[in-house]
Image (cartoon, rainbow, N blue to C red):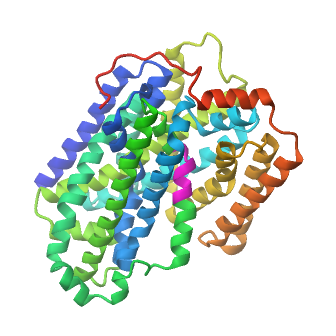
Amino acid sequence: MAVDYAVIVVYLAGMLAMGWWGMRRARSKSEFLVAGRRLGPWMYSGTMAAIVLGGASTIGGVGLGYQYGLSGAWMVFTIGLGLLALSVFFSARIARLKVYTVSEMLDLRYGGRAGVISGVVMWAYTLMLAVTSTIAYATIFDVLFDVNRTVAIVLGGTIVVAYSTLGGMWSITITDMVQFVVKTIGVLLLLLPIAVVKAGGFSEMKAKLPTEYFDPLGIGGETIFTYVLIYTFGMLIGQDIWQRVFTARSDSTARWGGTVAGTYCLVYALAGAVIGTAAKVMYPKLPSADAAFATIVKDELPVGVRGLVLAAALAAVMSTSSGALIACATVANNDIWSRLRGVVAKEGEGEQDEVKGNRAFILLMGVAVIVIAIALNNVVEALTVAYNLLVGGLLVPILGGLLWRRGTAAGALAAVAVGGASVIGLMAGFGILANEPVYYGLLASLAVYVVVSLATKPTDAAVLSAWRERLAGRGTEEPATPDPVTV
């Protein structure tokens, strides 16, 4: 394992070096939180694919393939569909707004009264996303170094918190680009073909497994529909995803770069399912489906290659974890703390002070994430709660604001409150992992949004006029600094 260890250590050291490099670039709020809005199409595509394809998409995607066969690709596939929908239909408008958070967009659209409540919901979602990503370090470091769960979480979490705090979005962007390359080589170019060959090829896999393993709908129509509601729609409104859209240097970069990233996700989804199916042939009686990835890597890959593939899994977890962490800190500072203090935009506050404030919040949120990850056991339930709240509470007011002119602030606030409360109540009644909470919560949010909006005074014409100006990209120019890292 010495060669494998060396590969991992070099990779982790490189992540920290990127954090130090990013610190020298992040000299303004825009540079620190959205990389100066200067990413070109190739870097934008790689970093967007990196953040959406995390540990759940890699380890969990292989696990679903082990359990259900090729239809296990649907979870990651719906993530790719959501990213494609966001990129084609909404990303250009989102990028032109030149904001930092989803709540700022709601304030612009509805007249400044939706921020704190929506910020709290979004903060809870990003916090739990960061926590669940951090917990995944335990699985990987256990395979690598045979360390206990707490040490693994602290080790992985500390590295992510360090480079995220140092350089903000610039550090995360550069590390995500490296992680994208490592994942592509490790999972798609190495693990996928090796797993299929070790399983005897597709003909042998079909001969040894039940026919439902090759049924594209074998996982079940209701499950697929739930994945669409949670993951496809979740991609449309998550702060971690929008914050990457804000980094694009142009409308076309956001649209076409995101389309490339979404297509990559579809390929990654199928690859994970095939790897899991191959693992089922080789190890038909594993104690847990989620153990399939670690088992096939540990037992079937040669020295050196094994280290690279484990680095790919680590890259997947780190990219999601760091993206969720900066999103969580941005919402906590800009949408909650600043508003509670009544300091949304302090006149005369220096850029360096804003960078220091956001850096402090990343550190604070990072420590909180590590502590919660150590204490938490059921990560699936935690992530389900987060996504249910996100979709049930925020999907309708966000998409309604983008698509329906008659939507009002009262309707948006009612939709957030009723949708969120319905989801919580229904989870208590049906169970956290049930499908009904997100179904009925979303319907309740939609009904309340439409009824209250129609029953209240339309949004002020001046607010809508300013909103249309921002959507058109007028009056939002930020000073640009020539930058070689725009590919």
- Relative to 364, residue 272 above or below: below
Q: Position of residue 140 (x, y in %)?
A: 31, 58
Residue 234: within the magenta?
yes
Residue 206: within the magenta?
no
Task: Name the residue located 29 percent from the left edge and 67 percent from the top edge.
Answer: 293
The answer to whether any part of residue 156 appears in the image is yes
- Choose between 438 and 146: the one closer to the eye: 438
To which quarter of the image does residue 429 belong?
A: bottom right
Q: Position of residue 137 (x, y in %)?
A: 36, 54
Quick one: quadrant of the C terminus?
top left
- Taking the image as shown, residue 390 lies to the left or right of residue 458, namely left
Task: Name the residue located 65 percent from the left edge and 65 percent from the top edge.
Answer: 438
* Image mark count: 0
Task: Name the residue located 79 percent from the left edge and 30 percent from the top edge.
Answer: 461
- Taking the image as shown, residue 21 lies to the left or right of residue 419, namely left
By secondary structure, the bulk of the magenta-drawn segment is best described as: helix
Q: Position of residue 473 (x, y in %)?
A: 56, 27
- Taking the image as shown, residue 353 lies to the left or right of residue 117, namely left
Q: Position of residue 454 (x, y in %)?
A: 85, 49
The answer to whether any part of residue 139 appears in the image is no
To which quarter of the image does residue 104 belong?
A: top right
Quick one: quadrant of the N terminus?
bottom left
Task: Name the residue located 42 percent from the left edge and 57 percent from the top edge.
Answer: 80
- Choose between 410 and 402: the one closer to the eye: 402
- Choose between 77 and 251: the one closer to the eye: 251
Q: Which residues are magenta?
A: 232-240
